[in-house]
Image: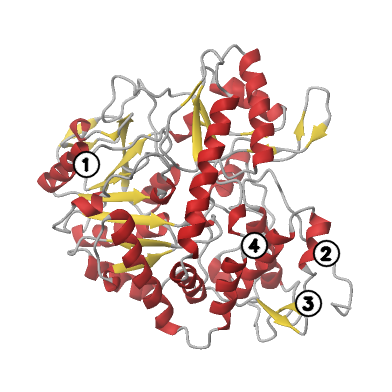
Amino acid sequence: MRHPREIDLPLTLDRASGVPLGEQLVRQVRELVARGVLHPGDPLPSSRALAVRLGISRGTVTAAWDVLNGEGYLVADRGATRITPSLTPVARPAPSVRTTSPGERRNAAARGEGPGTTSPASLPGASAGRASAGRAPARLGAAGPARSRSGQTGPVVDLRPGAGPVVALDTPAWRGAWRDAAGATALGESAETSLRGHLSDHLRLNRGIIRAPDEILVTAGVRDGLQLVLRVLGAARRRPLRVAVENPGYPALRRVVEATGHTALPVRVDQHGLDPAVLPAGRWGGAGRWDVAAPPDVLVVTPGHQYPLGGTMPVDRRVELLGWAREHGAVVVEDDYDSELRHTGQPLPALGALDTAADTVVTLGSFSKVLGGSVALGHLVAPAPLLPGLLATRADLGSPVSLVGQDALARFMGSGEFQRHTARMRRSFRRRRSLVSAALAGIPGVAVVPMAGGAHAVVEVADESRVLALARERGVLVSGLREYWTARPGEDSAGGGAASSSSAEGLVLGLTASDEDLTRGTAVLRRILREAGGS
């Protein structure tokens, strides 16, 4: 027998949670180890048997096991996969029982927290980075089986951004990179050094940003990089910062600003992203209005692919933005989260490439869109004046990214497989965007917003709340565009006044779902939108 006994671990999957299935397995095994349910040396079910029991692909299980192997939780031992015999669980008191409100549960889900998760500091191998939950706002309603008007429950089709795994990553090359990295005996600093070398080439060839490897910081993603930048800038200026954020924009970045003790200032965007002409030379007064005083200290922007509306900032506006920032002594934080996924035309030069003096722009990148949210890896390129403080702070705090993960990605990039995988993902997302556009074409009052790339789609509708409710009732989960707004059109916000060309009401669909789910889900949405006459 493959195992000395039959194993039936308490592993469950919630397909409506918005968390990729493989990531749920990783989190639950970590939790079982931390709670002492799994002991060092305990065997795990075979990937085939567990896949059958949970009703998922074997590749999803093996990918999760590879991640845990890379983090040091698992080893392959005499034909069985076991908890690492030398692993020492961290004892911790049982959590107190507390009833959480629906709002608390929604916010926890948006941060990638919830049942089966723990703080990294409480786990063995705590250097492993926390996984990202993808670019999705707080979830609407508790996830679970959808109930139709007849009272029958059925499978939920989850089309929310960040809800699906990157299936195309389940390849021998990716698994081999993790196995080789986990088996390397001399990682140490060499793993990070090797990855930074590959990142230097990647940024130079793909984004036009020329930086030496030792000028690049490895991060656990965009949010990790942003909090590090705000920490260093705040310490340098000896006061809370005023941070301009796009409105609508990625809610998690606004939460990072507020969680680090700074003030988030919403600035309206149009079809081309943030317009420097609307930037105030004043201060947010705290009562929903700008007071004349000092300009924002930091601008957080997504010029390559504004999130969620999808606009691309033209070059003349980028140059104007850099000029405004230099004039007002501001730092521009460029969230370059999915530049690899542009499938129409060529990407424009990154703001970091236009910043030839290397004194104004921080470029943050993430691999979560290409490799999946469970691979919490990214990079940070900073202006020369900020770099010493960032390096010193990172050295003091330590890196949240495991050396095994860094080595695995370095091997994947060095072999050329990363480039081939990225090309496959571009083709896949282009096909899926066309599928969404075709499925929802010709419905009065409905428009799929044109986008040049990315892993999501925005659909303008007239009555967002009604469509969301009907979709959920019929077993399809999507996000609402209103969840991304801080101040709504007509409310006080920098750059307010006329609304942008994109509606304030709409649906945001992730494109990481399987073709089958995407086809089924958009068919349901089409029926709903036609019945509602576009609303």
Q: Amino acid at mark 1?
A: Arg
* Mark 1 or mark 3: whose residue is earlier in sequence: 3
* Within-10-Å neighbours for mark 4: few <14, some 14–19, many 20+: many
Q: Secondary structure at mark 4?
A: helix
Q: In front here: 148 or 316?
A: 316
* Nearer mark to the viewer, of 3 and 2: 2
* Nearer mark to the viewer, of 1 and 3: 1
* Mark 2 or mark 4: whose residue is earlier in sequence: 4
To which quarter of the image does residue 439 belong? Answer: top right
Image disc number at residue 318: 1
* Within-10-Å neighbours for mark 2: few <14, some 14–19, many 20+: some
* Mark 1 or mark 2: whose residue is earlier in sequence: 2
Residue highlighted by disc 3: 43
> Where does the image place residue 414, in percent across and percent down from the top left?
44, 71
Image disc number at residue 497: none
Residue highlighted by disc 4: 27
**Distance of label 1 from label 2 (alpha carbons):** 53 Å
